[in-house]
Each structure stands twice: as C-alpha cells, then as structure tokens.
Image (cartoon, rainbow, N blue to C red):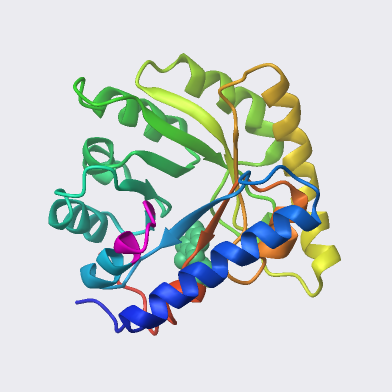
Amino acid sequence: MYVASNSADQIKTNLSFVSQQIEQLVQKAQRPKGSVRLLAVSKTKPISALQTAYDAGQRAFGENYVQEAVEKFHALSHLKDIEWHFIGPIQSNKSRQIAETMDWVHTLDREKIARRLSEQRPTNMPPLNVCIQVNISGEASKSGIPLEQLPSMVELVKSLPNLILRGVMAIPAPQQSHEAQCAVYSPLVTAFEKLAELDSQLDTVSIGMSGDMAAAIESGSSIVRVGTAIFGERDYHLTE
Ligand SMILES: *Cc1c(COP(=O)(O)O)cnc(C)c1O
C-alpha cells in the first residue's frame, strides 16, 4: 500500500542535510539556535522508512491520512518517545481515531472538529496539542480559517479542556520568489506574535515545507514540515 521511499542510507544522509540546512537558515535569520524543529512528513512512505529516520534520531513524524497514521501508530507503538503529528484534512467521522492516537494536530480549522477532538481525547492521555490552520492564500486553498477569524477560534480552542493551543499553521500556494513567499507569511506571523504576547503556551508557527523552508524560517517558523527532501518523491496520493 505504500510507495517506494529512498534507501535507508539516503534517508539518513537527507535527514542530516536538512537538519544542517535548518540550523544554517536559523543562524542567517539571527534567530536562537535550535528554535526551529523538524517534522518529518512520512505520508505514503513505508514503516521501514520511519524506523530508519527514528534510528537516526528523528522523533516527530507527520501524517496526512487517518487510516495510514493509525496503522503506523500501532506498528511503531514500541517506540515510546515517537511523536505523532496529524497534518491532513480532518473529517468529523475520523476525529475519534485522531484524538486517540496523535500527539499533535496542525490542521484544526472547524469549531465542530475542535469540540469533538476535546470530547474524544482519552482521559489517560495528555491534552492534544493543536495548531489552528489559517488560509493565507485566499481562493487557492479550501482549508484553513480566514485570518480575521483567528481570534475567535483561539478563544474557542482555549475554552476546551482537552486541547492545548500551541499556535498556527499554514500551507500557502507556492510563490514565484523568496520575497513573495515571505510576504505571504508575514501577516500570519504578525497575528501569531500578537496572540503569543498574551499566552506563553503559544509557541508554534507551523510553516515551511521542502520547497520553501528558507522563506518560512526567515519569516518566523518554529516547525518545518518536510517530506520529499527526506524520504523522496511521492508518486501518488493515498486515498481513504
Ligand atoms: C505533504 C505535506 C508536507 C510535506 O511536503 P514536502 O513538499 O514533501 O516537503 C508538509 N505539510 C503538509 C500539510 C503536507 O501535506
């Protein structure tokens, strides 16, 4: 069911290259060392590829499809310190599976889903870390709330007992230049910083992928979501 991934050696080489790149970009942006985390996006890739990355020291993994995420969660449940991040669209009939397995959700953009995730979070698990997904590309994207609705969504999520609001997330449409990419991120980061002044638990800006890590880190990313540059191309998308 999974697509071919890079060889184990290639994954290890890529991981160390991407980590170095992140630190160089952090330095160039004059930001504190270690201020950007790497989320390894392993969607469509086999469990062996995740194991290889884990063995090389990677702990945070991002998955987009509920069924696949849950399957990998069970297959790797012996790795106690692995961290599962859900970064795909959330259908309400799948929220329970997410609430019962994931450590983080980056793609929260509906009140109904927020309420369900909080209700369905098992009491023996820590609260679910969430980022609110914001649509910063207008019509180019169907996912995410408009930036104007961020304050009210923040209030809602903060009122739910089994969620911890950590920050914001975005998937912008690709731009023609580095400057244009930064310009798209700027209003989101500004809005986040305003909110973070009032709440020290808000520490996460989830922006940046293989293609725009430099712009995202320069703009203030705290977690980059990188798939292709680690695991190789995905030639098709799994559907559920
Ligand atoms: C697939 C995916 C990524 C990783 O994209 P790459 O271009 O392979 O680095 C990051 N974020 C989200 C939400 C994704 O769906």
* Residue drawn at point x = 27 percent, y = 54 percent: 66
In the picture, the quarter occupied by the C terminus is: bottom left
Q: Position of residue 209 (x, y in %)?
A: 58, 64
Residue 28 in the image: state x and y as whole percent: 80, 57
Specify the quadrant that holds the N terminus.
bottom left
Q: Please indicate, yes or no, whether residue 232 appears anywhere in the rendered image.
A: yes
**Which residues, given as a range, are shown in magenta?**
53-60
Name which residue lies at 66% across and 42% down: 146
Q: Which residue is nearer to you in this view: 149 or 237?
A: 237
Looking at the image, residue 6 sits to the left or right of residue 159; the answer is left
User: How many marks overall?
Assistant: 0
Is residue 19 positioned above or below 194 on the image?
below
Residue ID at (33%, 84%)? 7
Residue 232 spot, x, y in % from top left: 43, 80
Res 190 quadrant in image: top right
Counting from the top left corner in percent of width and height, residue 132 is at 54, 38
Of 227 and 33, nearer the camera is 33
Q: Is residue 71 above or below residue 159?
A: below
